Image (cartoon, grey):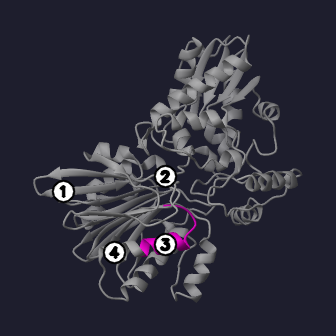
Amino acid sequence: MCGILGVVSQTPANQLLYDGLQVLQHRGQDAAGIATLDGRTFHLHKGNGLVRDVFRTRNMRALTGNSGIAHVRYPTAGSAVDHNEAQPFYVNSPFGIVLGHNGNLTNAEELKRQLFVDDLRHVNTNSDSEVLLNVLAHELQGRSKGLRLDVPIIFAAVSGVHQRCRGAYAVVAMIAGYGLLAFRDTYGIRPLVVGINETPQGLEYLVASESVALDTLGFKYLRDVAPGEAIFIDFDGRLHSRLCSDTATLNPCIFEYVYLARPDSVIDGVSVYETRLWMGEYLADKLSRDWEGVAIDVVIPIPDSSRPSALQLANRLGIPFREGFVKNRYIGRTFIMPGQEKRVKSVRQKLNAIGMEFKGKNVLLVDDSIVRGTTSREIVQMARDAGALKVYFASAAPPVRFPNVYGIDMPSRYELIASGRNDVEICREIGADMLIYQDLEDLKQAVARNNPAIKGFDTSCFDGKYITGDISPQYLDRLEARRGDGKVEKHEEQMELDLAMSLSSM
């Protein structure tokens, strides 16, 4: 998961891009980078760390020009945090191009071999984003024959990218001397929106991963970039667009609405906040059906993204809603941290219980999802330590049973607590008295009722049905081997059989 920005402005772009990255910081806390274009010269600064730590005044002063792109990064597909893989990436042949990418190419290794053997292009890092940049550069070179570009050539090159690249990708790229290019994969898995700002000097455009970046920077939401679509904004402020695929369909990643996106964002016409409210409604209805007669004294959310669901659930059931945990906002997300001991320590640093809300009560804890179960187990124990009589646990999302290969660095199959376990076994593992999960169909409905035009989703982490159709158990084995997570468990054969059955039912 990453956050991307691209801007063509009438004033210096550096502060706009910096402020936009601050708003998208939740999408990537490992690395940040900004590239601006001044005339035909790129100025680039990037490094590991939070946005506020990567950029100093001297760096900002050097980022001159009225256009540019920016990126915040989490490592995807199990890659390590390598400062060489911070984005944007740059190539100078046949045109100067900088590129930022959110997502993950599932055929990156195959493309890397093609680039080296057939296209005579060299890739320096293990990043699939650098692979994508070189594929784009090669497609531009082939269609322009090394001469000047025009808008039809640029869109034809994007069509070539769609034909060669598989997986998820939302992309912003700046082409020196020409303008800003942005495009989205043919399934629309990762989000991308475009906004406009009218100034006395002329029109300005901003492309971003989430609409919240448009809001905070003073841009008016124009629309989402469609699956398979490319938009090109030249330096005269003209926006060109074209659908560059004949097979494009909208299948956004449903986990964006569960957890990844900010609640004040709107993605593909769907309010993230409203979706989370509906998730609470559906979960409350399931509780009423399945837990009739269970006494619950108070509903407590696990901060922060579960709060709307927990509040709506409490309101619908007529149960008091209370804030029972205080969150330290300076601790990173735990489900992608290396090392079990470090994750357990991090949970205790991240949350602290308010004892009066637990003592002598039957408590229902509501979280957005359960991934490894490490956080859930520690939170249940914290509730007991604070004096809770009974600790019930509700997940606003279904069980996460499969890795995500489209840009979220979820753990291997063998680390997912729901992989190979039923609900009773998971409940026992996290130490709760009772456990309930959202139904997948209810989750889909919670999103789709905000935009009925969305007919499909990428729900692969819940059901193992990978929307691109190219993911096999062997692919996941290779992915886990690169992570160093490829240990064999007793239930490995059964999990591979389950995955194969899921793929065959698509």
Q: Residue 29's mark?
A: 2
Question: Where residue 475 sits: x, y (%)?
Answer: 72, 65
As helix, strand or loop, the secondary structure at mark 3 comes to helix
Q: Tell me, yes or no, if residue 213 can be seen here.
A: yes
Dot placed on the residue nearer the N-terminal end, 3 or 2: 2
As helix, strand or loop, the secondary structure at mark 4 comes to helix
Question: Where residue 357 sits: x, y (%)?
Answer: 59, 15
Residue depicted at x 62% and y 50%: 336
Disc 3 versus disc 2: nearer the observer: 3
Disc 4 versus disc 3: nearer the observer: 4
> Eyeballing the image, is 225 above or below 256?
below
> CA–CA distance between discs 4 and 1?
22 Å
Q: Amino acid at mark 3?
A: Val
> CA–CA distance between discs 2 and 4?
37 Å
Q: Is residue 396 left or right of residue 156?
A: right
- Badge 4: how crowded within 10 Å, few (<14), some, or many (20+)? few
Dot placed on the residue nearer the N-terminal end, 4 or 3: 4
Q: Is residue 122 left or right of residue 221?
A: right
Q: Which residue is mark 4?
A: 152
> Eyeballing the image, is 356 above or below 300?
above
Dot placed on the residue nearer the N-terminal end, 2 or 4: 2
Query: Magenta region: which residues?
Result: 157-169
> CA–CA distance between discs 1 and 2?
32 Å
- Badge 3: how crowded within 10 Å, few (<14), some, or many (20+)? many
Residue depicted at x 57% and y 47%: 456
Disc 1 versus disc 2: nearer the observer: 1
Which image quadrant for residue 46?
bottom left
Residue depicted at x 53% and y 79%: 124
Image marks 4 and 3: residues in contact by CB distance under 8 Å: no
Question: Where residue 317 sits: x, y (%)?
Answer: 59, 14
Q: Which residue is mark 1?
A: 203
